[in-house]
Amino acid sequence: MAAHEDPLSEVELGRLEDLLGSDIFHGEAMALDELQGFLCAILSGPELVPPSQWLPAALGESPHYRNSEQTQEILGLVMRFYNQIARALSAGETPDFVLYRPDEAAEYDYETWCRAYLEGVDFSPVAWEEAGDAGEIEELLFPIVTLAGELSAQTRRRLRRDELLQLLESCREELAGVVQDIHRYWLALRARPAALASSDAKVGRNDPCPCGSGKKFKHCCGAPDRLH
């Protein structure tokens, strides 16, 4: 394995964490948990986004870090972190979440991670809801939206406090699987037949498959066995 593909050790992960929070970035860089959430979305969308586009969003537009003595070290660690996440998702795994908590008695902060994931969703050059089935994407993203604190006021009003707490706990437990499900969803659409990819019509799971088989999309090109 080439050096730039080696997974980060605990020491290197700590070093990246320290660098992201250092004065080099003038407070513009994402923290490590934000960076991981953001990159999970960047790697899971309808189109792959090149590093030249997402690096300024992750590290800030300030030129200071580019002129620092640590520039090559920073970029090397960030790209290895990116590749580490990419390999895990491609292997059907979810990276170990980087989550913080204010103190030992507090719960882990899923909200920051999930907000960063949604930033990655919004960063996509192609809107997710336009590139896939809007209803399915909304359903897939629901646990992340919930943990990010982005539930609609109407939904919050419908839930009692104990129901909301139970929903949050359920979403935390589901998060790893949800991140993987979203990655598989877009991987399937990226790999679909050319005829389907060039179709102007949005295809729902229960619509006839555009490949002409006569089957529903979910039982043909959108079937689970096409996800790999």
Image (spheres, rainbow, N blue to C red):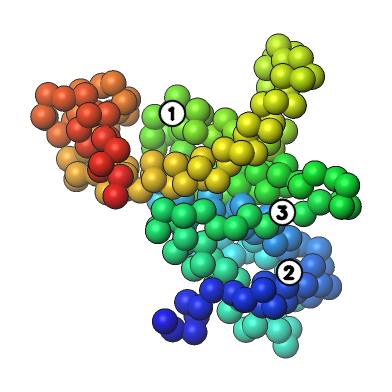
Residue at screen point 60% across, 47% down = 117
In the displayed image of the protein, which residue is found farthest to the bottom?
69
Give whichever of 103, 119 is nearer the camera.
Answer: 103
- State the image coordinates of residue 50 (x, y, percent, origin top left): 47, 63
Indicate the quadrant where residue 1 lies.
bottom left
Residue at screen point 50% across, 28% down = 139
In the displayed image of the protein, which residue is found farthest to the left?
213
Residue at screen point 67% across, 43% down = 115
Above or below 157: residue 198:
below
Residue annotated with mark 1 = 136
- Nearer the camera: disc 3 or disc 2: 3
Which label belongs to residue 99? Answer: 3
Q: What's the amino acid at mark 2?
A: Glu
Residue at screen point 76% across, 14% down = 160
Residue annotated with mark 2 = 17
Label 1 environment density (alpha carbons within 10 Å; few <14, some 14–19, many ≥20): some
Rounded to the nearest angstrom, the CA distance separating label 3 from label 1 is 27 Å
Label 2 environment density (alpha carbons within 10 Å; few <14, some 14–19, many ≥20): some
Q: Is residue 119 shown to the viewer in this render?
A: no
Side of 130 where 55 appears, left or right = right
- State the image coordinates of residue 215 (x, y, percent, origin top left): 16, 25
Rounded to the nearest angstrom, the CA distance separating label 1 from label 2 is 35 Å
Q: Is residue 89 shown to the viewer in this render?
A: yes
Label 3 environment density (alpha carbons within 10 Å; few <14, some 14–19, many ≥20): some
Rounded to the nearest angstrom, the CA distance separating label 3 from label 2 is 12 Å
Indicate the quadrant where residue 185 lies.
top left
Above or below 28: residue 76:
below
Q: What's the amino acid at mark 3?
A: Leu
Q: Earlier in the sequence, mark 3 or mark 2?
A: 2
User: Under tag 3, what secondary structure?
Assistant: loop
